[in-house]
Image (cartoon, rainbow, N blue to C red):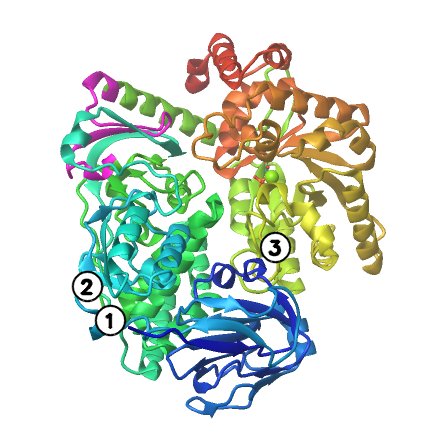
C-alpha cells in the first residue's frame, strides 16, 4: 500500500492571494486545467514552487511547467491573455529539460508593461497532474515569494497508472446518464472531486473509451450526452467503496436535478402525432425526414513528440481557416458569411490554443488536445446558463470538428439529399448547412438551438421554416417519413392529414402573392388611407444591410446596432475602421435620411474578449450598454469620435442603450460635447435614448426635455417589464411584447415625448410585426424601425388602415388583460377592417 507523503509548493511570487473562482477567465476559474491558486503579484520574478524538471516553457515566456520527482506537474501562468504579448515583457531564465531547485528564478517580467498591455497581471499556479492539496496558509492575504503555500498529497503513483499491486480492477454496473447535457463541466467536476477522495485508481468508461475519473478535463473528453451508458472501474484498497459511491453519484445526476433518461426508440416516436418546439424561422412546409448526424471520429490520446503534434495542430488550423475563407467567399448572404468569419476568429482565440498547447506538452496528440480544448470550453459555455454563450458553444463544437477532421485527414463528404427534405438533427451546424443543396431543403427541425441560434439565423436568411427545441424523440424518426413542419405553431406533425396539407399550401400561395405585391409597392410612402405618414426605417448591422434596406423602400436607418464592429475579435476596432464603416453607411443613406447609430450595447450576456468584465450572476441586470461604457469612458469617447466623423453625410443621430438614469444621459452628453468640441464641430448630432428599461419609460416626462428623440426597444422593455428572460425557451410564448403592460409603457412614453415636441420610434421586434402596425400607429408612434426583409410588408400594412380606426383599437387593447387577448383583438380588427383581396387585386 502506498504511504502518504506531503510535497510542499512554495509561493512563486510575492503578492496577494486571490480565490481561483474570482479569476475572470473561465478556463482558470473553473479549474479545467487544474486546481491551484492565483496571486496578484507585487514582485516580478517568477520562482520555482518545487524542485523538478522544466517540462515546458512557452517561447513567449509567459507560462512554464515543472514536473517534480513524484510526477507532480505544476503550471504557472503569468497574467491573463499574455500570450498576445508574444514574449514582450518576459525574460526566460531557464530552458526546457533543465533541473531547477525550489525557489530558483524562472522568468523575469516587466510588471508595468504587462499590466498596461495585457488583460491582467493575475498569475496562476495550477496542479495540472490533479493531486489534492491542503492550504498551509490562509487562502487570502499577502504572501512572500518562497513561502510554503500548499501541501500536496502525493500518496501512491501517478494518476494515469494502475499499480499492479492494487490487484484486479472492479467494475460498477452500467449507469445510464440522466443529466440533460451529459457530464458537462459542473457534474464532471463533482464526479472528479468525489473520485479524488479515494486512493484507488479509478476510471470512467464509455464504450471503448476509458479516462482517469479524477481528472475533470479527462472526463469531459469522453463527451458524454444524455442517455449515454457509462461504467466506473477501480483498483486499490478502497475500490469497492469507490465503485458503490461513484455509481450512485452518477445515477443521481452528480449534483444536477435529473429525471430518468428517455429511451429513444422508433415505437415511441411513431406513437406520437405532434412534436412541439419553438419557432426559429416562420413558415411551414410538407416534406420528408432526412436525419443529419455528425461523423464519429477516432482520436488517439497519446502523441508522438510535442514538436510534431504542435505542427499537426498548426497545419490543421491553417487548413481550417482557409476552408472557412472559401465558405465566406461563397456564402449566399451576409448572415452566412458573418458566421464563418466568427468561426475564423474563434480559431485565433488565445485561451483555446493555450489549453491545447498545455495538453500537447503533456504528451497528448494534436487531435486529442484540440478536441479536449474545444469540448471543455464548449461545455463550460453551455454550463453557464446563458443562451448566447450556449450558442457560442455550438459554434465552437462545429469549428472544433472542422479542425479535427483536418488534423485526422478525414474528408468532408457532401450529404446527398432527396427532393423536399426536412432536415432533422440534434444540432445543425453552420458547416453542415453551408454544404447543402438548398434547392432540395424545405425546412429544419432540431433538438438543440433556439430563436437566436445560427441555424435560426440561416433559416431566416434563406426564407426556410425552422423549429428548435424539439424533444429528443424526433431523432428516432425514420428517413423518408412524411411530416408537416408548421414553424409558426412550433409543431412538427408526424401524421398530417390531407386537409391540413392542402390548407397549408393554399396559405403559402396566398402569402407569396401578397409578398410579390408588397415588393412591387415597396418604394411608395407609408401613408395611412386617411393620409397620415409614418416613417419606416431599418434595423441594420452592416453596410450591405443598409444598401439592401434602401432597395426595399427603407426611409433611413432607425437602429444601427454598432456591436457588430466590436464582437468576435480579440482587440477593439481602430478609429479608422470605425470611422470608415460609419461614413460608408452614412454615405449610402445620403444627407436627407436619418442614421440612428446606437452606441455599444455589450456587457454581461455579450462579453468582449478585450474588455475585462467580471462574470455576473444576472448579466441582463448587470454591466450592460451605457453602464459599461460609462465605466470605461474612453471606449465611449472613441466611439463618439468615430461616429462624429460621418456628420453631414446623413442626418446623424446618436442613441444610448439601456439608459435607466438621467445622470447617464447627462454624463454621455457631456462626453459627446467634449469630443465634438475637440473636433471643432459647431453643431451636435441629435442625441436620443432607447426606452428599454421600465425606469426610463416611467420617467419619460423627465427625460423628454433633455433628448432629441426616443426609440423604444420592445425586446428589452418586455423582458424587464415582465421579468422574463427574452431568450428563455420555456417563456418564449409568454415574454410577449403585445402584453398590455408593455403597451401602456409605450403609450405613456409617446405622450410624454409629444408633450415636449420630441419624436418616438419603436425599434424592437414589435415594430416588425404587421399585426402590431395599427396598434403602434394608434398609440402615436412616429417611426417604425424594422428588420430589413419586412420593410415592404410593414409599409403595406400602414397603407391598409385609417389612423382614426387605429386610435380606437389602440385605446381598446390598453384595457385588456393579456397578450393573447390583445393579439386576438388585433386579429379581429384586421379581419373586420382590412380587405386584403383588394390589396392583392390592385
Ligand atoms: C430592444 O431591446 O428592443 C432592441 C432593439 O435592442 P436589442 O434587441 O439590440 O437589445
Ligand atoms: Mg435592447
Position in image of residue 84 (x %, y %): 55, 73
Check if residue 515 falls in the magenta segment: no
Q: Is residue 23 left or right of residue 58?
A: right
Could you tell me if the residues under marks 1 and 2 are in contact, i.e. CB atoms within 8 Å?
Answer: yes
Give residue 352's quadrant in the image.
bottom left
Q: Which residue is mark 1?
A: 162
Give the x, y percent position of residue 711: 67, 34
- Note whether ligand 1 is within 8 Å of mark 1: no
x%, y% of residue 285?
A: 28, 30
Using the image as rendered, state which of residue 243 and residue 106 is in the foreground: 243
Can you say which quadrant of the picture contains the N terminus? bottom left
- Give the magenta-colored segment's residue range: 473-501
Categorize mark 2 by other alpha carbons within 10 Å: few (<14), some (14-19), many (20+).
Answer: some
Label whose residue precedes the other's in the sequence (1 or 3): 1
Label 2 or label 3, whichever comes before in sequence order? 2
Q: Position of residue 80 (x, y in %)?
A: 57, 69
- The span from disc 2 to disc 3 (Cα, nearest Å) is 44 Å
Residue named by callout 3:
614
- 10 Å neighbourhood of mark 3: few (<14), some, or many (≥20)? some
Amino acid at each position: 500500500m502506498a504511504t502518504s507523503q506531503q510535497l510542499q509548493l512554495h509561493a512563486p511570487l510575492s503578492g496577494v492571494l486571490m480565490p481561483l473562482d474570482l479569476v475572470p477567465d473561465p478556463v482558470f476559474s473553473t479549474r479545467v486545467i487544474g486546481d491551484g491558486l492565483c496571486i496578484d503579484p507585487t514582485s516580478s520574478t517568477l520562482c520555482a514552487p518545487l524542485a523538478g524538471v522544466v517540462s515546458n516553457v512557452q517561447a513567449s515566456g509567459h507560462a512554464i511547467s515543472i514536473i517534480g520527482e513524484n510526477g507532480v506537474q505544476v503550471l504557472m501562468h503569468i497574467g491573463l491573455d499574455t500570450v498576445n504579448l508574444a514574449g514582450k515583457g518576459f525574460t526566460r531564465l531557464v530552458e526546457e529539460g533543465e533541473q531547477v531547485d525550489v525557489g530558483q528564478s524562472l522568468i523575469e517580467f516587466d510588471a508595468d508593461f504587462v499590466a498596461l498591455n495585457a488583460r491582467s497581471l493575475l498569475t496562476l499556479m495550477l496542479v495540472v497532474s490533479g493531486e489534492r492539496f491542503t492550504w498551509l496558509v490562509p487562502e487570502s492575504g499577502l504572501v512572500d515569494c518562497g513561502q510554503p503555500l500548499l501541501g500536496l498529497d502525493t500518496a501512491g503513483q501517478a494518476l494515469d497508472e494502475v499499480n499492479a499491486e492494487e490487484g484486479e480492477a472492479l467494475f460498477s454496473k452500467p449507469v445510464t446518464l440522466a443529466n440533460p447535457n451529459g457530464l458537462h463541466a459542473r457534474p464532471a467536476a463533482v464526479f472528479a472531486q468525489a473520485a479524488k477522495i479515494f486512493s484507488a485508481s479509478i476510471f470512467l468508461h464509455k464504450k471503448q473509451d476509458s479516462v482517469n475519473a479524477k481528472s475533470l478535463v479527462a472526463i469531459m473528453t469522453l463527451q458524454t450526452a444524455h442517455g449515454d451508458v457509462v461504467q466506473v472501474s477501480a483498483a486499490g484498497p478502497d475500490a469497492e467503496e469507490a465503485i458503490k459511491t461513484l455509481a450512485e453519484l452518477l445515477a443521481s445526476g452528480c449534483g444536477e436535478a435529473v429525471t430518468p433518461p428517455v429511451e429513444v426508440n422508433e415505437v415511441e416516436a411513431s406513437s406520437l402525432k405532434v412534436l412541439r418546439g419553438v419557432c426559429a424561422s416562420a413558415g411551414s412546409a410538407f416534406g420528408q425526414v432526412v436525419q443529419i448526424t455528425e461523423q464519429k471520429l477516432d482520436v488517439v490520446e497519446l502523441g508522438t513528440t510535442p514538436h510534431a503534434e504542435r505542427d499537426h495542430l498548426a497545419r490543421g488550423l491553417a487548413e481550417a481557416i482557409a476552408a472557412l475563407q472559401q465558405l465566406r467567399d461563397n456564402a449566399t448572404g451576409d448572415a452566412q458569411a458573418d458566421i464563418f468569419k466568427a468561426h475564423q476568429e474563434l480559431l485565433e482565440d488565445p485561451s483555446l490554443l493555450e489549453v491545447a498547447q498545455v495538453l500537447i506538452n503533456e504528451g497528448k496528440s494534436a487531435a486529442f488536445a484540440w478536441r479536449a480544448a474545444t469540448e471543455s470550453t464548449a461545455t463550460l459555455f453551455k454550463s453557464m446558463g446563458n443562451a448566447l454563450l450556449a450558442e457560442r458553444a455550438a459554434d465552437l463544437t462545429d469549428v472544433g470538428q472542422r479542425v479535427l477532421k483536418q488534423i485526422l485527414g478525414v474528408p468532408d463528404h457532401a450529404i446527398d439529399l432527396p427532393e423536399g427534405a426536412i432536415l432533422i438533427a440534434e444540432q445543425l451546424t453552420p458547416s453542415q448547412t453551408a454544404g447543402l443543396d438548398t434547392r432540395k431543403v424545405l425546412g429544419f427541425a432540431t433538438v438543440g438551438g433556439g430563436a437566436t441560434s445560427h441555424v435560426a439565423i440561416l433559416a431566416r436568411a434563406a426564407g426556410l421554416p425552422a423549429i428548435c427545441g424539439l424533444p429528443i424523440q424526433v431523432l428516432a424518426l425514420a428517413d423518408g417519413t412524411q411530416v408537416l413542419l408548421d414553424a409558426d405553431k412550433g409543431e412538427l406533425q408526424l401524421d398530417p392529414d390531407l386537409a391540413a396539407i392542402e390548407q397549408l399550401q393554399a396559405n403559402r400561395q396566398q402569402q407569396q402573392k401578397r409578398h410579390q405585391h408588397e415588393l412591387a409597392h415597396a418604394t411608395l410612402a407609408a401613408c395611412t388611407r386617411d393620409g397620415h405618414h409614418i416613417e419606416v426605417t431599418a434595423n441594420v448591422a452592416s453596410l450591405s444591410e443598409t444598401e439592401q434596406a434602401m432597395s426595399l423602400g427603407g426611409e433611413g436607418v432607425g437602429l444601427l446596432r454598432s456591436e457588430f464592429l466590436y464582437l468576435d475579435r480579440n482587440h477593439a476596432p481602430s478609429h479608422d475602421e470605425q470611422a470608415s464603416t460609419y461614413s460608408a453607411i452614412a454615405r449610402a443613406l445620403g444627407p436627407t435620411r436619418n442614421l440612428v447609430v446606437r452606441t455599444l450595447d455589450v456587457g454581461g450576456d455579450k462579453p468582449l474578449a478585450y474588455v475585462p468584465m467580471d462574470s455576473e450572476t444576472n448579466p441582463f441586470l448587470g454591466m450592460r450598454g451605457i453602464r459599461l461604457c460609462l465605466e470605461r469612458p474612453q471606449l465611449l469617447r472613441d466611439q463618439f469620435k468615430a461616429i462624429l466623423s460621418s456628420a453631414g453625410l446623413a442626418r446623424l443621430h446618436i442613441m444610448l442603450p439601456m439608459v435607466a438614469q438621467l445622470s447617464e444621459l447627462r454624463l454621455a452628453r457631456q462626453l459627446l460635447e467634449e469630443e465634438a468640441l475637440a473636433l471643432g464641430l459647431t453643431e451636435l448630432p441629435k442625441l436620443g435614448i432607447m426606452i428599454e428599461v421600465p425606469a426610463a419609460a416611467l420617467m419619460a416626462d423627465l427625460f423628454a426635455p433633455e433628448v432629441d428623440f426616443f426609440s423604444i426597444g420592445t425586446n428589452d422593455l418586455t423582458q424587464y417589464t415582465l421579468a422574463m428572460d427574452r431568450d428563455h425557451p420555456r417563456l418564449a410564448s409568454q415574454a410577449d411584447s403585445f402584453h398590455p403592460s408593455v403597451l401602456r409603457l409605450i403609450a405613456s412614453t409617446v405622450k410624454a415625448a409629444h408633450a415636449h415636441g420630441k419624436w418616438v420610434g419603436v425599434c424592437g421586434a414589435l415594430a416588425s410585426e404587421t399585426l402590431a402596425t395599427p396598434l403602434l400607429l394608434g398609440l402615436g408612434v412616429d417611426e417604425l424601425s424594422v428588420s430589413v426583409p419586412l420593410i415592404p410588408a410593414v409599409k403595406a400594412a400602414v397603407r391598409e388602415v385609417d389612423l382614426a380606426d387605429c386610435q380606437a383599437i389602440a385605446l381598446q387593447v390598453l384595457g385588456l388583460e393579456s397578450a393573447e387577448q390583445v393579439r386576438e383583438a388585433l386579429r379581429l380588427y384586421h379581419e373586420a377592417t382590412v380587405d386584403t383581396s383588394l390589396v392583392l387585386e390592385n
